[in-house]
């Protein structure tokens, strides 16, 4: 009888550990199957140098424009909704965008003296662009066919795109540009891109 009890006890322990092992394996598979965040190397990006009185659409459509390595507009914004366009080359981006469902973008703001401003609502909006020779504006405040992302209040309390969780997006193809526009705060004369991350909700800037 004692031997039977011992055998049953051993079987019970093996069953418990077997279940735990199976559970851990599933969890590991799920974790291993997730895609790590893709943090874009900003040193691989360039921006279109702004030209006085020449719209960004005209420069991009003609293909005749100068570029700069600084990801901050060198010419101050002169009116609301001025543009600053950053080129996203394929070599700097993920090879398969179907793996990513979220986007996080962060930036800094500066006044006319070059002093950094405290971020807040109504300072800028950012748009992700598929085709640089297509419609760069899209709908007034929502995404469009060529602007799959159009996010208001970047850096502010009401904005989402600059937060670790970012915003949700389903890519139909690889984007080719990122366009910032200053908004209602007339103090904002310069905007600088500080990070661009494609991820799946598991990104943390503290990592």
Image (cartoon, helix red, strand yellow):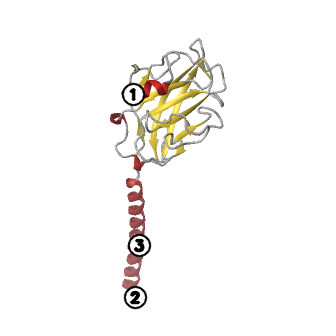
- Depicted 123 relative to depicted 53: above or below: below
Residue 186: percent from the left, percent from the top?
65, 20
Name the residue that disc number 3 marks.
13
Q: Are marks 3 and 2 in contact (CB under 8 Å)?
A: no
Q: Which element carries disc 2, helix, strand or loop?
A: loop
Residue in the picture at 34% in, 43% down = 95
Q: Which element carries disc 1, helix, strand or loop?
A: loop
| Mark 3 neighbour class, 10 Å CA radius: few under 14, some 14 to 19, many 20 or more | few
- Depicted 186 relative to depicted 41: above or below: above
Mark 3 or 2: the one toward you: 3
Residue 105: percent from the left, percent from the top?
51, 35
Q: Nearer the viewer, residue 24 or 127?
A: 127
Residue in the picture at 38% in, 85% down = 4
Q: Nearer the viewer, residue 188 or 28?
A: 188
The extreme bottom residue here reads 1
Q: Which mark is residue 180?
A: none
Q: Nearer the viewer, residue 144 or 162?
A: 144
| Mark 2 neighbour class, 10 Å CA radius: few under 14, some 14 to 19, many 20 or more | few
Give the alpha-carbon distance from disc 1 to disc 2, as whole Å: 76 Å
| In this rendering, position of residue 89 left or right of residue 142 | left
Name the residue that disc number 2 marks.
1
């Amino acid at each position: 009888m004692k031997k039977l009890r011992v055998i049953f006890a051993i079987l019970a322990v093996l069953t418990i550990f077997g279940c735990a092992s199976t559970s851990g394996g599933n969890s590991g598979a799920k974790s291993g199957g997730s895609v790590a965040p893709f943090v874009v190397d900003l040193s691989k990006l360039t921006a279109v140098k702004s030209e006085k009185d020449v719209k960004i659409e005209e420069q991009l459509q003609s293909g005749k424009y100068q570029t700069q390595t600084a990801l901050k507009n060198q010419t101050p914004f002169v009116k609301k909704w001025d543009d600053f366009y950053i080129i996203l080359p394929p070599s700097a981006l993920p090879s398969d965008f179907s793996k990513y469902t979220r986007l996080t973008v962060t930036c800094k703001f500066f006044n006319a003296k070059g002093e950094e401003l405290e971020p807040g609502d109504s300072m800028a909006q950012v748009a992700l662009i598929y085709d640089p020779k297509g419609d760069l504006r899209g709908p007034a405040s929502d995404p469009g066919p060529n602007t799959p992302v159009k996010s208001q209040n970047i850096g502010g309390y009401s904005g989402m795109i600059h937060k670790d969780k970012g915003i949700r997006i389903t890519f139909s193809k690889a984007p080719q540009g990122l366009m910032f526009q200053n908004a209602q705060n007339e103090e904002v004369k310069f905007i600088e891109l500080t990070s661009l991350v494609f991820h799946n909700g598991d990104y943390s800037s503290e990592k």
